[in-house]
């Protein structure tokens, strides 16, 4: 009887461990985007990681750059040449930690990623294409009309950073407001949800900001 109970407990523990690893593996699979700060200059410019069953694939938004095999155990990502650890602060926010040299010292650096998920909306996929959107964020207000480009001469990302084009893009059913500087995609705001007269976007540090939508008004560049 004791032997039977011990075998049952051992089997249960093994099952729980396997279930834990399998859950972690399923939880990390998919595409994740790093939300950089407006003044940051990075490569890739828009860093996206995709985890599938055996590969990590890196993109610059929709352009594939590199891939690597990996093993997953508990909260460790084994890339053969390096090891990373990870955690979830929310179901849709992934934090990856790794060692790096900084000013000659071993330092733990971390990067946070947002899961790419379908933008919530009961409206047609092209609903925003002929609408005017007003976004106030980081002490600046930008007014956008995708049919006619910007309503002002420049899109203000920060005090010292201005860009000359903005586009509505879709990746993995998630819509984005993408800001281009000199024809290069420099910054994106993922759209969480679209309603008839408002939308919610993700900004750096996973701050949610709200924008206002007005219908069918065509604006001219100043």
Image (tube, rainbow, N blue to C red):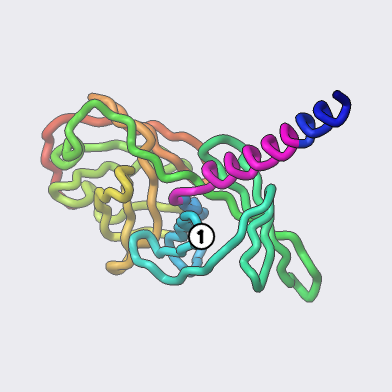
Residue 205 visible in rendering: no
Q: Nearer the viewer, residue 40 or 154?
A: 40
Q: Quadrant of residue 214?
A: top left
Residue occupying image coordinates x 30% and y 36%: 134
Residue occupying image coordinates x 32% and y 67%: 184
The segment highlighted magenta reads 11-31
Position of residue 37 relative to residue 212, above or below, is below
Q: Quadrant of residue 183?
A: bottom left
In the visual, does 40 lie left or right of 152?
right
Q: Nearer the viewer, residue 160 or 181?
A: 181
Q: Quadrant of residue 124?
A: top left
Farthest-out residue, bottom = 104
Residue occupying image coordinates x 38% and y 44%: 190
Q: Which residue is mark 1?
A: 54
Q: Residues within 10 Å of mark 1 (few under 14, many from 20)?
A: few
Q: Residue 5 in the image: state x and y as whole percent.
A: 82, 26
Q: Quadrant of the N terminus?
A: top right
Q: Main secondary structure of the magenta part?
A: helix
Residue occupying image coordinates x 19% and y 44%: 145
Position of residue 75 relative to residue 104, above or below, is above
Position of residue 77 relative to residue 168, above or below, is below
Q: Residue 218 in the image: state x and y as whole percent.
A: 11, 41
Q: Residue 182 in the image: state x and y as whole percent.
A: 30, 68
In the visual, does 216 lie left or right of 212?
left
Q: Secondary structure at mark 1?
A: loop
Instruction: Tell me if residue 124 is in the magenta stretch.
Output: no
């Amino acid at each position: 009887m004791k032997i039977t109970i011990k075998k049952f407990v051992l089997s249960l523990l093994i099952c729980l461990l396997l279930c834990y690893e399998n859950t972690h593996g399923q939880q990390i699979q998919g595409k994740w985007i790093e939300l950089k700060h407006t003044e940051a200059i990075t490569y890739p410019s828009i860093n996206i990681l995709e985890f599938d069953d055996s590969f990590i694939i890196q993109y610059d938004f929709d352009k594939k750059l590199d891939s690597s095999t990996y093993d997953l155990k508990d909260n460790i990502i084994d890339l053969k040449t390096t090891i990373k650890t990870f955690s979830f602060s929310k179901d849709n926010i992934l934090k990856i930690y790794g060692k790096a040299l900084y000013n000659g010292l071993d330092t733990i650096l971390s990067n946070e990623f947002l899961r790419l998920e379908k933008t919530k909306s009961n409206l047609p996929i092209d609903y925003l294409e002929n609408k005017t959107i007003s976004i106030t964020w980081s002490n600046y207000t930008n007014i956008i009309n995708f049919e006619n480009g910007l309503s002002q001469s420049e899109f203000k990302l920060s005090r010292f950073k201005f860009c000359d084009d903005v586009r509505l893009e879709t990746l993995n059913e998630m819509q984005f407001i993408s800001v281009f500087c000199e024809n290069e995609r420099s910054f994106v705001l993922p759209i969480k949800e679209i309603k008839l007269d408002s939308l919610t976007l993700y900004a750096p540090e996973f701050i949610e900001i709200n924008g206002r939508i007005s219908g069918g008004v065509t604006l001219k560049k100043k």
